[in-house]
């Protein structure tokens, strides 16, 4: 590994991608392959009854898969098994998969989608994570508290810290959901290889996919093979299952290759988003510019499903005080179910939202103290030997001072 440090290494897939030779899943064709299309919920929260008889009667439709066709467990999920492969009795968000049409051509499959009849008995939804945490709020997952995760940090005594502070700033900050918008929407093809079902799909976790496909089909992992062709961007958005189980189930049942391609609109519906955060901050400092206390509450909207909520909200909590030393810290971060699109991994994994809050807190406090914002940050920024909010001692590779000095230098040059 160290032989590569400091050298200009050749990226192994660069030539094939820039010359158009790279093979993406939608580029793969197999003789006799069938085509799959997913029927998705058009409402965010409802009890459902599904009738696919009219769709299955269309000439050229081979089969319409629903929850009753699952041969193993009708669930999947990277941390919590809270997704259904096909929703059976209830949908929890717009875009939930209800059925998978397999037909001789994509056009026939598309036509069959229009013939699927779903009776929606709509029930009250909850779209604000704060309201979702209230007593009596609609339950996204029946019998389960919407607050699916709670992470705490306690360091020192924040009440004492605020009592000794000369300046205290309390603000609330909000960031929205963000889509990964990778260039290559989801696509895949599956086929049988002896007793093994093979799924070719661009994914970030082929080993997790293998486990989840095997559980849903009720077969040993050894009978599932995941192949990962070229990936046209991911950024965390391909860490959860989308079409993998649908394809594998169809090929194993029909003994035929089955291919599916999402368009951009369906891609938006199918995969996770970056978590929207509500961040309540209370920060105290002395008149000479030393931070004394920070109290933070973060509420992360994980939408209808948990995905990586524990990892993301834990990271959000860990990074809540930023690159600054604070002797007294209290952090509570929550991951909360709502009927919004589900949230999961995206670059930064919970570390990108808190800077929106803590850096504005730093600017506001500096202004109240009549102090230059760079000078104020320098008084509190991490150095070797600093102790973080979680009690970690930083003893190497602490370059926050150099980074801030470089930023300040650029700002000064641009302001000349």
Image (cartoon, helix red, strand yellow):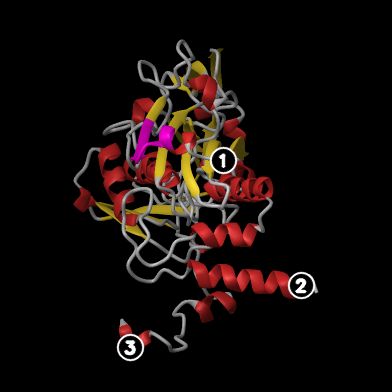
Element under disc 1: loop
Identify which residue is drawn at 47% across, 76% down.
13
The percent position of residue 135, horizontal first and vertical second, equals 45, 12
Magenta residues, as a range? 149-160
Report the Cα–Cα distance between label 2 and label 1: 33 Å
Residue position marked by numbered label 1 in the rendering? 166
For disc 1, the neighbor class at 10 Å (few under 14, some 14 to 19, many from 20) is some
**Relative to residue 71, is residue 106 drawn left or right?**
right
Q: Nearer the viewer, mark 1 or mark 3?
A: 1
> Which of 188/59 is in front?
188
Frontmost of labels 2 and 3 is 2
Marks 1 & 3, CB-CB < 8 Å contact: no
Q: Which numbered tag is attached to residue 414?
A: 2
* Quarter of the figure with residue 392: bottom left
Mark toward the start of the polypeptide (2 vs 3): 3
Give the residue pinned by disc 3. Answer: 3
Give the label, 2 or 1, closer to the camera.
1
Instruction: Please provide percent x and percent y for residue 184.
Output: 57, 58
Q: Quadrant of the C terminus?
A: bottom right
């Amino acid at each position: 590994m160290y032989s590569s440090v400091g050298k200009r290494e050749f990226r192994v897939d660069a030539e094939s991608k820039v010359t158009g030779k790279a093979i993406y899943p939608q580029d793969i064709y197999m003789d006799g392959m069938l085509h799959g299309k997913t029927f998705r919920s058009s409402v965010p929260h409802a009890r459902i009854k599904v009738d696919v008889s009219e769709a299955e009667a269309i000439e050229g439709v081979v089969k319409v898969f629903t929850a009753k066709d699952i041969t193993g467990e009708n669930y999947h999920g990277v941390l919590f098994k809270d997704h259904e492969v096909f929703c059976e009795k209830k949908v929890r968000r717009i875009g939930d998969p209800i059925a998978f049409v397999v037909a001789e051509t994509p056009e026939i499959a598309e036509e069959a989608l229009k013939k699927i009849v779903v009776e929606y008995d709509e029930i009250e939804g909850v779209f604000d994570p704060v309201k979702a945490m209230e007593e009596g709020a609609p339950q996204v997952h029946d019998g389960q508290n919407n607050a699916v995760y709670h992470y705490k940090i306690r360091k020192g005594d924040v009440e004492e810290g605020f009592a000794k502070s000369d300046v205290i700033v309390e603000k609330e900050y909000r960031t929205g959901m963000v889509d990964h918008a990778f260039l290559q929407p989801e696509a895949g093809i599956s086929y049988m290889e002896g007793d093994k079902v093979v799924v070719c799909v661009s994914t970030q976790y082929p080993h997790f996919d293998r486990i989840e496909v095997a559980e849903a089909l009720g077969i040993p992992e050894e009978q599932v093979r995941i192949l990962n062709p070229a990936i046209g961007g991911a950024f965390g958005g391909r860490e959860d299952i989308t079409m993998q189980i649908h394809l594998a189930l169809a090929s194993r049942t029909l003994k035929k290759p089955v291919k599916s391609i999402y368009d951009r609109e369906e891609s938006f519906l199918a995969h996770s988003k970056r978590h929207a955060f509500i961040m309540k901050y209370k920060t105290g400092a002395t008149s000479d510019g030393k931070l004394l206390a920070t109290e933070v509450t973060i509420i992360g909207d994980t939408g209808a499903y948990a995905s990586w909520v524990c990892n993301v909200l834990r990271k959000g909590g860990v990074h809540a005080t930023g690159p600054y030393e604070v002797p007294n810290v209290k952090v509570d971060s929550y991951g909360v179910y709502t009927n919004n699109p589900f949230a999961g991994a995206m670059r930064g994994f919970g570390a990108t939202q808190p800077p929106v809050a803590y850096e504005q807190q730093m600017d506001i406090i500096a202004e109240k103290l009549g102090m230059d914002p760079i000078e104020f940050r320098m008084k509190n920024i991490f150095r070797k030997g600093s102790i973080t909010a979680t009690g970690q001692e930083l003893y190497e590779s602490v370059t926050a001072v150099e980074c801030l000095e470089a930023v300040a230098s650029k700002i000064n040059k641009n302001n000349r």
